[in-house]
Image: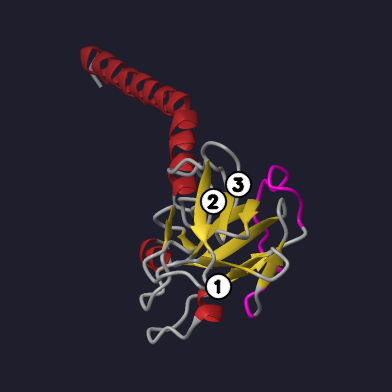
Amino acid sequence: MKLPLLLDTLRLSKMISNTLHFRAGISRRLLPGVLLVCAAVVGACTGPTTLAGLTQNGTQPFFVHALSGSALATATAIAFPARSVTRVDGTFNFDVAFDIDASGNVILLTPELVGQNPAGNRLVGIITGIGSYDAILEAPLTGYTVDSATVVARGQAVAVQAQESVCATSNPTAPYLYAKIVIDSVDRIGRGIYGRAMIGGDCGFRQLIQGFPSF
């Protein structure tokens, strides 16, 4: 091989080697960032409890009348998706209805205990004995009563697990909204009930604290 041609070949080989080393260096420097991005993307797809909720929790005072003896148009229940009190009627668009017994205790009733919904009743469960309102920081996964009324005294808190059609549509793997409720006072003469509720706004999130839930 002639000397000029040999020199040109050596120069070309060196240029190719330098280019490969440069590209490898870039790849090594970019790899941690790429891995972080991939991890974030994978985490976002693993389910509703891997990222913070989109809707803030917050304690909401409420007032309802006792279900028995009240007019149909009177608010006697709470609807979780709307975070509001509502009436009990044939639409069954409520999660917990309220009544008062002869001793002045409050009776919590799920839709199934109020009547038979022609479209099928949703599964709503209530659990007691898990602490005060402020001490309940998350709703349990199990242990809910679904087939009998729950009687609570003033100051007694409960957690609620409610199957919601909006969750079945938006997130079938997490069909429940969770909440905690406490009764503050009862007007036995006027048949009124005062209480507070914290209702989760994101399906599947059980953490019941002020602000955005993380699971």
Res 114 seen here: yes
Mark 3 or mark 2, earlier in chain: 2
Front position in the image: 199 or 105? 105
Q: Is residue 137 left or right of residue 85?
A: right
Rounded to the nearest angstrom, the CA distance separating label 3 from label 1 is: 20 Å
Bounds of the magenta span? 130-147
Q: Which residue is located at x 41 percent, y 74 percent? A: 92
Res 144 seen here: no
Question: Disc number at residue 171?
Answer: none
Q: Which residue is mark 2?
A: 49
Q: Which residue is mark 3?
A: 208
Which mark's residue is nearer the viewer, 3 or 2?
3
Q: Name above or below for residue 155 compared with residue 144.
A: above
Q: Secondary structure at mark 2?
A: loop
Front position in the image: 143 or 110? 110
Give, as a three-letter code, the residue at label 3: Leu
Q: Secondary structure at mark 3?
A: loop
Q: Which residue is located at x 37 percent, y 61 percent? A: 170
Q: Which residue is mark 1?
A: 110
Q: Of helix, strand and loop, which mostly describes the magenta segment?
A: loop
In reply to whether residue 161 is colored magenta, the answer given is: no
In reply to whether residue 142 is colored magenta, the answer given is: yes
Q: Position of residue 44 (x, y in %)?
A: 45, 47
